[in-house]
Image (tube, rainbow, N blue to C red):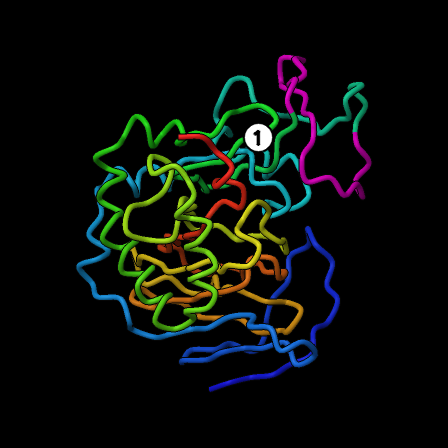
Amino acid sequence: MELYLHENQIELKKFYTCVNIIRGDCDLYNIDNGELIFSFKKNVISKEHYDLDEKIITYASSYSNNRGDAAGITNIKDLQKGMEHWKNHPVEVIDKHGNPLPEDHQQTTSFIKMKNGEINKRKRSNQAMSNSIGGYDKSNVYPCRLTNWTKKNIEQYKSLFPLSKCISDLYFSYVPDKWLYQYEKYSKSPKEFVIPETNFSTLTINRDWRTAAHKDRGDCKEGLTAFTVKELDNFEGGELCFPNYDIGIDIREGDLLLFDPHVTHCNNKLTKNGRVSFVFYLREKLDKCEG
């Protein structure tokens, strides 16, 4: 099925629920410019590709506080996730001067005050079971690198390679023009920072996480993001939502979604947990790194 729809304007940082749910093969295009928004394919990844090292799932289940807009507007409840029983945990969202932020603030990263009165010196987003694996390009703080977890868990990282290659090969078969553009940038990137035999450098893994409306930063501008899930249980809800088009995709194990990460997206609410998602992409500036 092919759909051609007009884009609506949706605010970032907010949570939205898409009503129209897609459960079969579908390609969506922006009717105004003809650009591909997503291509969804059912049951194209075989079960054995999801046979990953258990440490991958454990890592997916750990919290991080650097997810920005995707984690939504900062609030104490979500800043405390995973720390509820700690003796010292966040108790107040503040500005850099230590003043409480108003209830209607719109910040997705904030300074926080801890229970013991200490002010955290680094801005944080809401806690989320979301972490990155693989290569990263240079930032204002860090050089080009493998993520810290990746460097410490190389063999576990390698257990992702068969799934990565399978998804990259499928990406080429369905959207070869985007794949080739991405591969040109991939082929100029240092080999130690990319996933072998693919056109990806990085993946983000999320467990039972509902994202707010956001656009991904740092992904290959003319490429696509590839998305699949592993079912730890028969989860319900959590459809990947494109709120500008009011369409959600019910992605199950074995399915593949290729989409433009610079189009606003989020998730519907999960009503039953058991979902680990894998988001494969190429960092935009990785080809500028030195090997």
Relative to residue 79, is residue 23 depicted above or below? Answer: below
Check disc 1 and report its element: helix, strand or loop: loop
The chief SS type of the magenta part is loop
Question: Looking at the image, is 182 positioned above or below residue 289?
Answer: below
Mark 1 highlights which residue? 139
Q: In what quadrant of the picture does the C terminus appear? A: top left
| Residue at horizontal 49 percent and vertical 45 percent from the top | 283
Q: Looking at the picture, how far across and down is residue 145, in whole percent?
A: 43, 29
Magenta segment: 101-122
Q: Is residue 275 left or right of residue 75?
A: left
Please say whether residue 104 is one of the residues in the magenta stretch.
Answer: yes
Q: Residue at x 71, y 29 (%)?
A: 93
Asked whether 175 or 8 is in front, the reply is 175
Residue 273 shown left or right of residue 218 in the figure: left
Question: Where does residue 230 sit, x and y in percent of width and height?
Answer: 31, 57
Q: Could you say where residue 28 lies in the image, as x and y percent from the top left?
A: 54, 77
